[in-house]
Structures are given as C-alpha cells and as structure tokens.
Image (cartoon, rainbow, N blue to C red):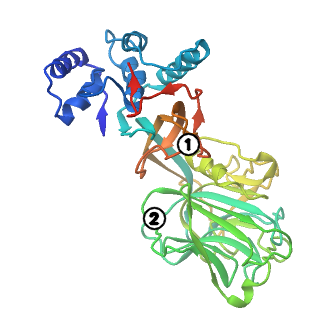
Amino acid sequence: MFYRRRLVGVDRAKKRDRRRCERGDHHHHDDQRKALAGGVLCRPGHDGFSLIEMLVYFTILSVVATGVYTLVDYIQQTNARIINTVRVTEQADEAGAFLRAYAQNAEVIYTDDIMAGDSGCLTLERRRQDTITGSWFTGDGFYVRDADFAELSGNDNRTISAWFWVPTSQMGRNWILHMGRHDQDRQQYSLYLNDGFPVLDFKDVNVRPTDGTTDLRDGAWHHVAVAMEADNTSTTLQQTQFRFLIDGSLVTTELNGDNSQMGFPLNTQPGTGGQGVIVGGRTTNGAESYEGAIFDVRIWDRPLTNAEIVNIYESRQRDIMIQPASEVLRWKLSAVPTDNATVTDTSASTNDGTLTQIDGLLDVEDLLFSTTEETRVGRAFAMYDTDNDGRYSTWFNDNILLSGLVTPCPNSPIGEAGWVEVSQDVFVTDGDGFFST
C-alpha cells in the first residue's frame, strides 16, 4: 500500500481516526491507511506494533507538520519493547535517529506488509530531475577518433561503457564504438545498433541479447556496458565471459555468427593496420556512422563488476570515478572542445580524440544535445531477521531506482548493492510478529 504524505490537517485526521479506533470501527482499509499517516493505528486483537508500523512511527511522526507528536515523545508513550540493556537501547536510539535524519522530502511513502518471521520495508519516494548532455552525431560521416589508441590488444580483459540517445528513425547498423581492424575476423571489437538492437561485434562473430525484441529507439537515454573476461591469451571466444548490462540490468546473451571462428581467441588489433578507437563510426570513410547522441564513453583494461557498472548507470550525468587506475579512455562528449576539435581524455591515459567530419565541413554550433528526465528514486528503510533468531536489525538503502521495480526491498539484504545495516539485531517481536507494548 502507499499514501501521499500530508503536511496539513494531520491533527484533525489523527483525532478522527482515534475515535474510530475507540468505537471499534476497524474494517475499513482506508481508515487504517489514514491512521498510519496520523500516527494512530487500529489493531484489533493485538496490543503491539508490526515491523511496518514501527518503521512508520520512526519516520512519519518526525516529518509531518509542527505540533504533531515528536518521534521521541510517541515512542516513549508507546513503550515499544526491545532487549532491555543499555547498550541495546543505545542501538535502538541510533536506528531511530538514523531513520529520522533521512526521512525528508518524500512525495510518496510505500510500505510492504509483513508476516511473522518475515521482514518489513518502508520506502520514501521522490522525483529526481536528471539533465544529460551529450554530443549529437549526424550520421553522415561525423565521428571522434584516436588513431594511436593501443591500450588493449588481443583478448585482453576490458570493459566498455557508453550512454546514447537513439532517435526512433534509426535504421540498419550504426556504430557506437569501434576499435581494431574492421576487415579481419576477430580483430575488431565494436558496439553497434541494428534497428535499435545492441550488438557487440568481432566481425562474423558477435555477442547479442537473446531477447531479440530489445529496441532502444524510444527517445530516452540508455546506458550499455560490456565487461569481458578471458582466463589467458589462448581463451577462445566460446570460453570468454561477456557480461552485457543495459540500464544497469544484466541481460542474457548468446554468441552468434561463424562457428568456425568461435574456437579461436579474440585478437583485437587497434594499432598498425587498425582504426585505433572510433566513436560514432566504424571506419574513417564514414561508413555506417551513427545518428543520435552519445555521452560519456569509457574503456577499462579490466572487467568491472556488475555493481560497479550499476553505480555508473545510477550516477548518470553526475561524475563518478570507477577504478581510475584501470581506466584507459574517457570521452565525456558533454562540452564543445575549446579548439572545436580535440576531445579531451579525462582518464589517466590521455588518449585524446579528434572531432572529424569526412567532408571537411565540421560545424560545432549544434554539437551538444540535452534532455531532462524525471527518475523515481527512493530511500528504503527495512527491518530484517537475517539469521532467523527472532531479532530484527534496521537496514538502509539511500538510492533505489524505483522505476520498474515490483518492490523496493529484497527478500534479504545480504549481498545486495546499496544495503547497509545500521543497527544491531535488537528489535524483538512476539510469536505473531508484533512488537510488544
């Protein structure tokens, strides 16, 4: 269930709902929802609080209008039971203070219902405005190139990452990023779109999502990253691990193409005879160049973890350093070059690129392309009994992307990115899953 936080009329609603509780009017779900907002709960047959109610008391009562009961006063009046030691009491106070400090500016508050021995989750939602600025590639032989790039070769481990905005008109194969030789099997390493469908290509062999309906031509920014991991120089394409993430989510992929080439190692050749690195095209003659916007192209000489890639995706335009010692190229493409030509590499490797228009008529006046998007993000507070001993601890996640999620909180926070335990397991329930009063 969810409700919108109200900063006016809370006292009146609170008194009304208290009267409903006193007269035994317990059968309206809406009444219970409103009672939660005012800090009063009808709970027939139980003299206690569920995990969710504890979370609500910890948060809602501290952010509503001035004059409503404060958190500390209310918790003192209800005398919620915890393990009775000074050390544990301090832990509970710290957990409550932590929740209060972060329960700010919520537009919508979600709660997940719980059963005895389960978990409780409360999420504060807000809308985040994200402006992303990239460079517009015209599709007519315009690209960025570093002819001398040679940081990777053979089947060296690597990660590539890029944001791009694809117009609905995109047709056929358009190259986002290319390194190596385009005319020899397994000597190129390229990311392209084919009618909005992302493909990692090695010439005659490629890695692609198994879901053939993937189409990124929706007028929104998308982040694609591929981490490649080979055990040694002789690891074949069939044995090489490719992790393909779209918008922070790992997608299932398949190796596709010429079977006779799959039993050999990748042999990327960006140097002599190769194209170096090109963004927005495949060759220097402008063939199959990209039409659309590109932002923040990055290459590492190691496979990033999924969590690191998710961190890049969630940061969007906000600058974030990930494995800087292993980053060998970063072209942000979010500003017009000071000399109208040189794209500065902000990694430690200084692999600068050059804006190139094959007809020689380079015009940077309309180079930049910006959009502002609204993202639903949340702060989630939860109570979990992670070791099944009947004692619950408080957990926190400061930055959950809510769009598309069925529920903000996992069944268990152990090993989940972003989840931090902020109290010891000091909260105790009765056999029905309620905190005692």
Q: Give me the residue at 53% from left, 45% from top.
A: 412
Work out whether residue 280 can be spotted.
yes
- Above or below residue 262? Residue 350 is above
Q: Give me the residue at 71% from left, 46% from top.
A: 322
Outermost residue toward the bottom in this view: 260
- Residue 166 location, x and y as percent? 49, 63
Query: Which part of the image, by quadrant, shows the C terminus?
Result: top left
- Residue 189 location, x and y as percent? 72, 72
Q: In the figure, residue 294 lies in which quadrant?
A: bottom right
The kind of residue tagged 2 is Pro
Work out whether residue 335 can be spotted.
no
Seen in the image, is 22 located left or right of residue 204?
left
Q: CA distance from mark 2 to mark 1?
A: 38 Å
Density class for disc 1 (Cα within 10 Å; few <14, some 14-19, many ≥20) is: some
Density class for disc 2 (Cα within 10 Å; few <14, some 14-19, many ≥20) is: some
Q: In the figure, residue 182 lies in which quadrant?
A: bottom right
Residues under numbered marks 2 and 1 in contact, where contact means CB atoms less than 8 Å apart: no
- For residue 177, the mark is none
Q: Nearer the viewer, mark 2 or mark 1?
A: 1
Front position in the image: 394 or 182: 394
Seen in the image, is 145 located left or right of residue 172?
right
Judging by the rendered image, the residue that carries numbered circle 2 is: 167
- For residue 413, the mark is 1
- Above or below residue 148? Residue 35 is above
- Residue 340 location, x and y as percent? 67, 52
Front position in the image: 150 or 300: 300
The kind of residue tagged 1 is Pro
Q: In the figure, residue 24 lies in which quadrant?
A: top left
Q: What is the secondary structure assignment of the residue under circle 1? A: loop
Seen in the image, is 433 located left or right of residue 101?
left
Query: Which is nearer the N-term, disc 2 or disc 1?
Result: 2
- Residue 225 location, x and y as percent? 63, 60
